[in-house]
């Protein structure tokens, strides 16, 4: 099969996208597919003609362009099967954190109490400790724990000009659950370095522990988390795969966010969850390919 991997782009997550794409390409070649890269820095217009040579399009693009549905909106106009989902609208809604928070509130899915903010005064009125997030930030790059007014004063001022919100800081057990072809995978418990959170830097350091089967949680809570994740995945019609993050505080799971194109290296969370379910990385990538539509 001839497969075109779409990757790169210009977001702050370009390097992670390229790393994921490199690993996906390696597996596909091992599985006897003909594989090419297309760096989206080249633009979309040349892609129209180039894509005609391939059987399947495989987007491996993190950040808003990929996970927020921008690329998929363009791809949906091409008459080619796409790995993941064709539903760019659902991707956009799940990616947009304020839209997603509103969806959770309206559907009795617990998330941390929150408030849209347009300046420092809004954050002061909300109080500390809190978590500041931009609505379209990815890979925890625009997430800041605010424990005091000093942390607020250290917040990059340009972020306050973006669509943003704060939510109550909830201590607890951070976990993530992947969805693969309509089934919830085993949960992974995430333990960042002591006194820190699962920031962009801590996602790529061996100091963070990622433990399959979430030993700190009982089976009832794990089942509840998997059920919520499946419900969210199906509502937004995210196709063959996604990953959804939670914090469990005082035994209650709260949804943090949805990852519509999670990392795709053997060391990434979703492939680790597949491995815990007995699915090798090669098998995992091939499963994604089989369900391209």
Image (spheres, rainbow, N blue to C red):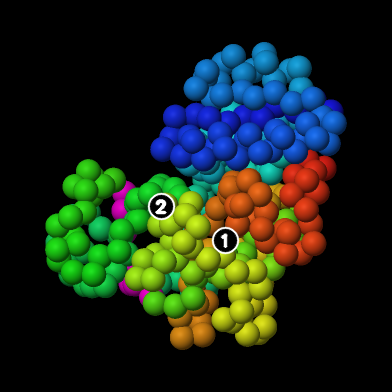
Q: Residue furthest front?
A: 206
Task: Name the residue nearer the viewer: 27 or 207.
Answer: 207
Dot 1, how many residues are within 10 Å of its Cα: few (below 14), some (14-19), or many (20+)?
many
Left or right relative to 149: residue 249: right
Q: Position of residue 125 (x, y in %)?
A: 18, 69
Quadrant in which residue 193 is drawn? bottom left
Quadrant of the image containing the N terminus: top right
Dot 2, how many residues are within 10 Å of its Cα: few (below 14), some (14-19), or many (20+)?
few
Residue stretch in magenta = 163-170
Task: Name the residue nearer the viewer: 137 or 213.
Answer: 213
Q: Residue at x 80, y 35 (%)?
A: 30
Residue underneath mark 1: 244
Q: Residue at x 66, y 30 (%)?
A: 5
Image height of 42 relative to 11, above or below: above
Q: Position of residue 274 (x, y in %)?
A: 72, 58
Quadrant in which residue 143 is drawn? bottom left
Check residue 183 for magenta coloring: no
Q: Secondary structure at mark 1?
A: strand
Eye-nearest disc, 2 or 1: 2
Q: Residue at x 67, y 54 (%)?
A: 271
Task: Name the residue nearer the viewer: 29 or 57.
Answer: 29
Q: Position of residue 177 (x, y in %)?
A: 62, 64
Q: Residue at x 41, y 38 (%)?
A: 12
Image height of 153 relative to 46, above or below: below
Image height of 17 relative to 256, above or below: above
Q: Position of residue 59 (x, y in %)?
A: 63, 35
In the drawing, what numbered circle is on residue 201? 2
Which callout, 2 or 1, points at the residue further toward the start of the chain?
2
Quadrant of the image containing the C terminus: top right
Q: Is residue 198 visible?
A: yes
User: Dominant secondary structure of the magenta stretch?
Assistant: strand
Q: Mark 2 and mark 1: span between their CA atoms?
A: 19 Å
């Amino acid at each position: 099969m001839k497969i075109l991997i779409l990757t790169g782009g210009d977001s702050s997550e370009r390097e992670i996208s390229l790393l994921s794409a490199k690993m996906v390409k390696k597996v596909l070649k091992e599985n006897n597919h003909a594989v090419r890269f297309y760096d989206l820095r080249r633009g979309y217009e040349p892609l129209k003609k180039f894509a005609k040579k391939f059987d399947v399009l495989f987007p491996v693009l993190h950040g808003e362009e990929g996970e927020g549905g921008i690329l998929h909106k363009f791809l949906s106009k091409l008459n080619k099967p796409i790995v993941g989902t064709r539903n760019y609208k659902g991707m956009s809604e799940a990616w947009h954190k304020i839209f997603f928070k509103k969806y959770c509130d309206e559907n009795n899915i617990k998330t941390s109490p929150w408030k849209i903010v347009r300046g420092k005064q809004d954050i002061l009125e909300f109080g500390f400790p809190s978590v500041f997030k931009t609505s379209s930030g990815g890979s925890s790059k625009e997430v800041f724990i605010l424990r005091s007014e000093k942390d607020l004063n250290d917040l990059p001022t340009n972020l306050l000009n973006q669509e943003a919100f704060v939510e109550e800081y909830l201590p607890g057990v951070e976990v993530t659950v992947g969805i693969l072809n309509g089934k919830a995978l085993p949960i992974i418990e995430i333990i960042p370095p002591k006194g820190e959170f699962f920031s962009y830097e801590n996602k790529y350091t061996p100091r963070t522990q990622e433990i399959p089967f979430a030993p700190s949680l009982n089976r009832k809570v794990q089942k509840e988390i998997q059920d919520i994740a499946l419900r969210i995945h199906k509502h937004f019609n995210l196709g063959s795969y996604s990953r959804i993050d939670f914090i469990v505080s005082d035994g209650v799971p709260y949804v943090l966010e949805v990852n519509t194109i999670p990392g795709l290296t053997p060391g990434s969370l979703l492939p680790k969850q597949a491995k815990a379910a007995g699915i090798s990385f090669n098998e995992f990538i091939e499963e994604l390919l089989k369900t391209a539509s």
